Image (tube, rainbow, N blue to C red):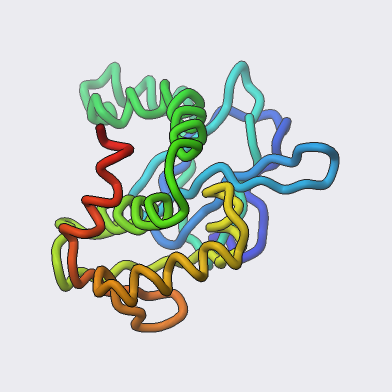
């Protein structure tokens, strides 16, 4: 278990274990220019992560909400693979490529407007937490507006304004501060088409 606000590992810590998140949300961040904390991304329930290279963690992992997780050593994973019970190929590939995927995600946001970036974030989290993203689906965002803004390279005020515009357009409906319902998936996907193309 890991309570909200606690750190699972810190940037530069020794370690190469793989973590499987069973419940909750984990944020990944680094500090630049001394004390500037930049959120790189998030992991949600059901996902695997490690973010280690040559036995060192590349970033810090912090619980956004109360979490349950499973820890697997690289030796255990190799044993599973040797015995024919290894991770599905796409998951194993994800672990190998996660530092580069994170870099790609960060760079891709530079070419989006604020509304496109926020719409894409909602679709991304929604598709990772719902079996099928569709009209009527509920998207729960554990993270604060400040963490979303840091992750997207925006200000908190800009994120709030974008959410209001997406709500006013009828694309989403605010159900609570952390819950949104998708009303018009086509509009959201249209806003994210710039990234997908």
- Vertically, is 154 above or below 179? above
Give the vertical position of 157 relative to 87 (above or below): below
Residue 117 locus on image (x, y percent): 42, 50
Q: Please give left or right for residue 168 compared with residue 28 in the image.
A: left
Residue at 57%, 57% in the rendered image: 149
Who's the residue at 60% across and 64% down the image? 156
Q: Quadrant of the C terminus?
A: top left
Q: Nearer the viewer, residue 126 or 157?
A: 157
Would residue 135 be found to the left or right of residue 7 on screen? left
Q: How many marks?
A: 0
Which of these two is toward me, 97 or 73?
97
Which image quarter holds the N terminus?
bottom right
List x then y, in percent, for residue 145. 56, 66
Residue 104, picture quadrant: top left
Q: Residue visible at 41% across and 28% down?
A: 95
In the rendered image, residue 55, in percent from the top left (x then y), is placed at 63, 21
Left or right: 3 as drawn, with respect to 94: right
Q: What is the x, y in percent for residue 194?
A: 30, 39
Q: Is residue 169 left or right of residue 98?
A: left
Q: Nearer the viewer, residue 159 or 139?
A: 159
């Amino acid at each position: 278990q890991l309570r909200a606000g606690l750190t699972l590992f810190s940037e530069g810590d020794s370690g190469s274990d793989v973590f499987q998140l069973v419940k909750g949300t984990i944020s990944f961040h680094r500090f630049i220019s001394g004390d500037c904390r930049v959120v790189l991304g998030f992991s949600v329930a059901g996902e695997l992560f490690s973010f280690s290279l040559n036995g060192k963690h590349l970033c810090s992992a912090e619980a956004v909400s109360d979490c349950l997780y499973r820890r697997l050593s690289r030796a255990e994973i190799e044993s599973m693979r040797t015995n024919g019970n290894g991770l599905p190929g796409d998951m194993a590939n994800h672990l190998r490529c996660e530092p580069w995927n994170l870099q790609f995600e960060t760079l891709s946001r530079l070419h989006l407007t604020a509304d496109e970036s926020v719409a894409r974030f909602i679709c991304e989290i929604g598709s990772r937490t719902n079996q099928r993203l569709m009209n009527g689906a509920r998207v729960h965002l554990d993270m604060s507006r400040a963490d979303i803004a840091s992750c997207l390279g925006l200000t908190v005020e800009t994120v709030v304004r974008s959410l209001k515009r997406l709500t006013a357009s009828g694309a989403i409906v605010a159900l609570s501060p952390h819950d949104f319902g998708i009303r018009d998936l086509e509009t959201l996907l249209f806003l994210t088409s710039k990234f997908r193309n």
